[in-house]
């Protein structure tokens, strides 16, 4: 292979994985010596853990060098040993990895400050990205800033900070060196620190563009001995010390960083002004409102969590011409003020209203109690995404959705808990739901529908859903009384749509005919059957139908049953994990099962089940 021109060889080996490189190096001495020269691009990113220390890795070490740009060092042991971290860092030093730009340290205890700082200073003098995840450390971020003058991104994710004995000296030293600012532009501080420490960090970051505070998960642990702190109470300090801030998410305004999907770089630009603002309203209207008013022209995304009627006057005065995403969660405000604000947001594309609906009906007569919600929607003619948590009475007035002709995504968490189950399946209720979807089908370009906590999607409703040719994603609860032939007919009608992902909840069984119809959907890439909130009955799955679906589908990539299932063959059940794995491996050549679990079920007085059940069965297509 190495007799070919070097550019062709480099192109060939660029498709290698790191394991491919190590395997090829074992072929002969010539390849052992030559492969590392041509595969430097494959080794730009490296992941190490303690298992690497259990034996020599001379082939891997030959592949490392100054071309390595990104390194993740993680601990896989419950009791992470500092000595192992030092050994792995020393290994990188010995291999000449001096060009590292990004470093992640995951699940380590880092308490020996002097030794660790010394090794880190040698390891990556050009480091620009540093992340500490699920770590226990006593090193102040200020000390890390000093050893990495080129650092631009610093992340602490679900960490615990236990300050060392010279913590006070570090803060005083930082205050004396405030004239030597860092180059940091992105900070994620998902770690509890006292306010003085946070302020010292912000003083060192005058070029900061993005700041994300502590998650609810980290706040609730209370493992640190430091007093409570909050970035939200320091808004004035943030904007005065970091005048270029463009992306700000304050403490406790997100559950966990795993659920925080917004990317700061999507909102940042060279122009000044705040573009993303996510905050808890209960920290004070005066302080928040002042900065909200100042940045109302530049804001593109606004999320306010838990606020009261005092905000109504603020909403009336706001004018946000560039706002594209608005999220109001657990709010209490007058409908008039909300409508007035939406009238001044002509570019709004996504509206997320997760509220206690009785608050939105403030002072509205009972017979008109849904009117404010639709008055709100009428002000959003260009709306593309709508997420709403409400009582299911809003289905009674579907005309409010008629003006949303640009709507592409509708997610509704419908609260039907107050209604008895039998009342949800009356002909009147089903007729209302069917009429609602008919209006959607006639007046929108929907690509995604997700309805939670509503189980009245009968046959007529499903037929209406299947007439929306633009639909790509469907996630709904089925009527538990839906007949098998009706479900099969619905799936057959979906062949005329662009459906790519289908999630059905509440399904009692998947017969051969139903699964065969699913295999004929030309674009279906993901199918899932999941729990419903009001259902705990095992789902019957035809063995032959399952195999037919896997063999015939040309597009299916993921098939998932996140529910208790019974795979049936000639009225007999296949109940063990090994039987299901063998079924897929032996009779289909292009699929694998990465996860399938069996467990003993608990019998209750009103629910008698089989002794053993399968759940979380996930089948993936093998990449070829």
Image (cartoon, rainbow, N blue to C red):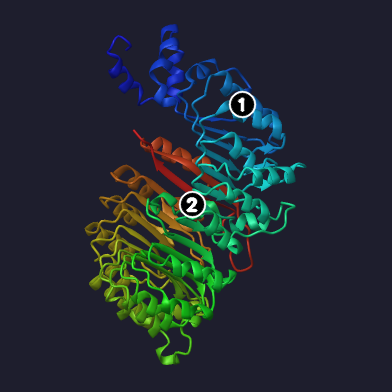
Q: Is residue 188 left or right of residue 514?
A: right
Numbered label attached to residue 210: 2
The answer to which quarter of the image holds residue 104 is top right
Residue shown at the point (59%, 59%) measured from the top left: 231
- Rendered location of residue 355, percent (x, y): 49, 74
> Would you say residue 240 is visible in this rendering?
yes
Residue 542 position (above or below residue 45)? below
Mark 2–mark 1 distance (CA, rounded to whole Å): 31 Å
Q: Earlier in the sequence, mark 2 or mark 1?
A: 1
The answer to which quarter of the image holds residue 246 is bottom left
Numbered label attached to residue 310: none
Secondary structure at badge 2 equals strand
- Rendered location of residue 153, percent (x, y): 51, 43
* Residue found farthest to the right: 165
Q: Residues within 10 Å of mark 1 (few under 14, many from 20)?
A: some
Residue shown at the point (62%, 35%) measured from the top left: 76
- Rendered location of residue 9, percent (x, y): 31, 17
Choose mark 2 or mark 1, whichever is in front. Answer: 2
Secondary structure at badge 1 equals helix
Residue 401 position (above or below residue 542)? below
Q: Residues within 10 Å of mark 2 (few under 14, many from 20)?
A: many
> As rendered, which of 579 and 127 lies closer to the eye?
127
Numbered label attached to residue 88: 1
């Amino acid at each position: 292979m190495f007799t070919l021109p070097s550019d062709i060889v480099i192109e060939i080996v660029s498709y290698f994985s790191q394991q491919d490189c190590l395997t090829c190096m074992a072929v002969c001495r010539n390849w052992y010596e030559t492969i590392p020269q041509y595969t430097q691009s494959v080794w730009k990113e490296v992941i190490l853990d303690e298992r690497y220390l259990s034996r020599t890795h001379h082939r891997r070490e030959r592949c490392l060098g100054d071309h390595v740009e990104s390194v993740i060092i993680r601990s896989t042991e419950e009791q992470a040993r500092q000595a192992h971290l030092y050994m792995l860092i020393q290994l990188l030093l010995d291999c000449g990895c001096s060009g590292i730009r990004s470093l992640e340290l995951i699940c380590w205890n880092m308490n020996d400050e002097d030794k660790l700082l010394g090794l880190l200073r040698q390891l990556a003098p050009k480091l620009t990205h540093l992340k500490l995840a699920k770590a226990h450390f006593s090193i102040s971020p200020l000390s890390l800033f000093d050893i990495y003058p080129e650092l631009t991104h610093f992340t602490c994710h679900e960490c615990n900070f236990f300050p060392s004995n010279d913590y006070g000296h570090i803060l005083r030293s930082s205050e004396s060196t405030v004239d030597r600012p860092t180059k940091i532009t992105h900070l994620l501080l998902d770690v509890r620190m006292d306010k003085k420490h946070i302020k010292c960090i912000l003083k060192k970051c005058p070029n900061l563009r993005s700041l994300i505070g502590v998650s609810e998960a980290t706040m609730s642990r209370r493992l640190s001995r430091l007093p409570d702190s909050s970035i939200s109470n320091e808004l004035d300090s943030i904007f005065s010390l970091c005048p270029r801030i463009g992306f700000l998410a304050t403490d406790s305004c997100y559950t966990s960083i795993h659920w925080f999907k917004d990317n700061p770089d999507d909102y940042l630009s060279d122009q000044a002004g705040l573009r993303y603002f996510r905050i808890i309203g209960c920290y004070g209207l005066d302080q928040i409102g002042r900065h909200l008013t100042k940045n109302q022209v530049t804001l593109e995304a606004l999320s306010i969590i838990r606020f009261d009627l005092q905000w109504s006057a603020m909403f009336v005065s706001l004018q946000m011409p560039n706002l594209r995403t608005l999220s109001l969660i657990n709010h209490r405000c007058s409908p008039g003020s909300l409508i007035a604000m939406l009238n001044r947001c002509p570019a709004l594309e996504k509206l997320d209203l997760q509220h206690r609906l009785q608050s939105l009906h403030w002072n509205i007569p009972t017979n008109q109690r849904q009117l404010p919600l639709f008055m709100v929607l009428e002000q959003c003619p260009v709306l593309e995404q709508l997420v709403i948590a409400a009582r299911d009475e809003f289905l009674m007035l579907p005309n409010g959705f008629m003006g949303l002709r640009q709507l592409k995504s509708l997610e509704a968490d419908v609260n039907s808990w107050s209604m008895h189950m039998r009342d949800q399946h009356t002909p009147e209720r089903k007729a209302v739901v069917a009429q609602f979807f008919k209006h959607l089908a006639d007046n929108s370009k929907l690509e995604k529908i997700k309805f939670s906590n509503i189980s009245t999607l009968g046959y007529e409703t499903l037929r209406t859903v299947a007439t929306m040719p633009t639909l790509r994603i469907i996630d709904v609860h089925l009527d538990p009384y839906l007949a098998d032939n009706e479900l099969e007919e619905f799936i057959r009608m979906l062949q005329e749509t662009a459906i790519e992902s289908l999630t059905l909840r509440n399904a009692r069984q998947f017969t051969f005919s139903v699964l065969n119809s699913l295999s004929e959907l030309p674009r279906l890439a993901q199918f899932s059957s999941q729990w419903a909130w009001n259902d705990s009955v095992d789902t019957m799955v035809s063995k032959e139908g399952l195999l037919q679906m896997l063999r015939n589908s040309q597009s299916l990539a993921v098939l998932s049953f996140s529910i208790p299932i019974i795979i049936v063959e000639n009225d007999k059940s296949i109940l063990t994990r090994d039987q299901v794995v063998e079924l897929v491996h032996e009779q289909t050549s292009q699929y694998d099962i990465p996860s399938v679990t069996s467990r003993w079920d608990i019998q209750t007085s009103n629910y008698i089940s089989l002794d053993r059940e399968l759940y979380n069965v996930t089948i993936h297509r093998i990449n070829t």
